[in-house]
Image (spheres, rainbow, N blue to C red):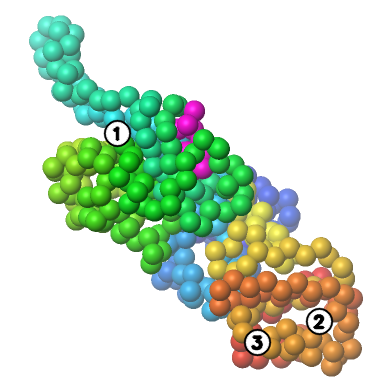
Amino acid sequence: MYKVKLYNKIARTGTDLLDQRGYEWGEDVENPDAILVRSADLKNIKLPKSVKCIGRAGAGVNNIPIDECSKQGIVVFNTPGANANAVKELVICSLFLSSRRIVDGIAWAGTLKNEEGAILPIVEKGKGKFVGPEIEGKTLGVIGLGAIGVMVANASIALGMEVYGYDPYISVDAAWGLSRNVHRATDLKGLVANCDYITLHVPVNDETRGMLNRELLEASKPGVRVLNFARGELVNIPDLLPLLESGHVASYVSDFPEKELLGRKNTVLIPHLGASTPESEENCALMAATEIINYLETGSIRNSVNFPSADLAREGKYRLCVIHRNIPNMLSQISSFMAKRGINIENMLNRSKKEYAYTVVDTNVEPDEKLISELTAVDGFLFVRAIK
């Protein structure tokens, strides 16, 4: 029986699946085989040596020490697309919030409760301060065409917008789902110069951190409206502030409140509600639980952020799973160790991802603890286990 430690409350769709497989799970589980987490910070937690994988019920993995996990051979999964519809709906809502000054209008209406007499004449007189444009016929630039970006682009087309998309790394699956009416942008400056609205849907990494900076913002169309429902670190806030003040950026709507933006004009700050729907939490929990179950029971990897995808049809009674560095002579050493024991390889799969690789070997002879121990001791091998 496998054991799963929870670091957050996980929706019942996920824990029910663990129950169905006979797993032990909970926040007090010791020596777990896997960890299920949402937003809890694992960076300062010493992970037990028993941990083989971590399932993040969500897309972002900033709360997980990816590099350390990779060195220990711990596979980290996320759930891309599971919360995509929830985020898409809030982005579409925010297109209107950025245009129509709805939030400011509601706040102003709330101040009228102490007015004497009828307030309708006051409303009619004051509503002119909150005029804003319609989005139909306007141009939207979508930066990042993953699961969420594609859904936002398609929904915006349906609302009558002209949409440009930028993503030099778009996947085949995403490309298949993208409306043929979305125009391809080949560079960011060209995109921002022609768009009335810009929405960000890329992960945070060394290439994207602070990508929306003074240079790009000043190249944007005057009066541009910017939406950020990806990560706060994508926007250089000190560069944004003077352009908000001048009105060059007419509105900034973000799901990641920054202290420097609190109380600023032309901003709408939402308390990270993008995936805060019961449907999204259920989808993420189910997907994360499925990923760790498949890995623990079959060695299959899908949606890992640090190791390659791998799925091999079973062709033996036993399966040897080896996580190792992506360097020469790894496969030959696995074959050599097995040959010395007279173990025939029925099937094998090897996949790599940057500096790491994963090899799955099927055999009809059980790999014993001595073989596993000897392989683990070899320089370059990070984690070795056998599955019956």
Asked if the magenta segment contains residue 151, the reply would be yes
- Residue nearer the viewer, 180 or 318: 180
Q: Which residues are magenta?
A: 149-158
The N terminus sits in image quarter: bottom right
What residue is pinned by disc 1? Answer: 98
How far apart are labels 3 and 1 at the CA level? 53 Å
What residue is pinned by disc 3? Answer: 328
- Residue drawn at point x = 51 percent, y = 42 percent: 150
Disc 2: CA contacts within 10 A as few (<14), some (14-19) or many (>=20) = many
Q: Position of residue 376 (x, y in %)?
A: 67, 86
- Residue nearer the viewer, 285 or 15: 285
User: Which comes before the other along the chain, label 3 or label 2?
Assistant: 3
Disc 3: CA contacts within 10 A as few (<14), some (14-19) or many (>=20) = few
- Residue drawn at point x = 48 percent, y = 56 percent: 168
Q: Amino acid at mark 1?
A: Ser
User: Which comes before the other along the chain, label 1 or label 2?
Assistant: 1
Q: Position of residue 85 (x, y in %)?
A: 52, 38
- Helix, strand, or loop for circle 1? helix
From the image, state whether disc 1 or disc 2 is nearer to you. Answer: 1
Task: Give the image quarter of residue 268.
Answer: top left
- Helix, strand, or loop for circle 2? loop
Q: Amino acid at mark 3?
A: Pro
In the rendered structure, find residue 367 and report the number of the disc placed on it: 2
How far apart are labels 1 and 2 at the CA level? 60 Å
**Relative to 64, 115 lies left or right:** left
How far apart are labels 3 and 2 at the CA level? 23 Å
Residue 113 in sight from this viewpoint: no
Majority secondary structure of magenta residues? helix
Vertically, is 317 above or below 23? below
Asked if the magenta segment contains residue 161, the reply would be no
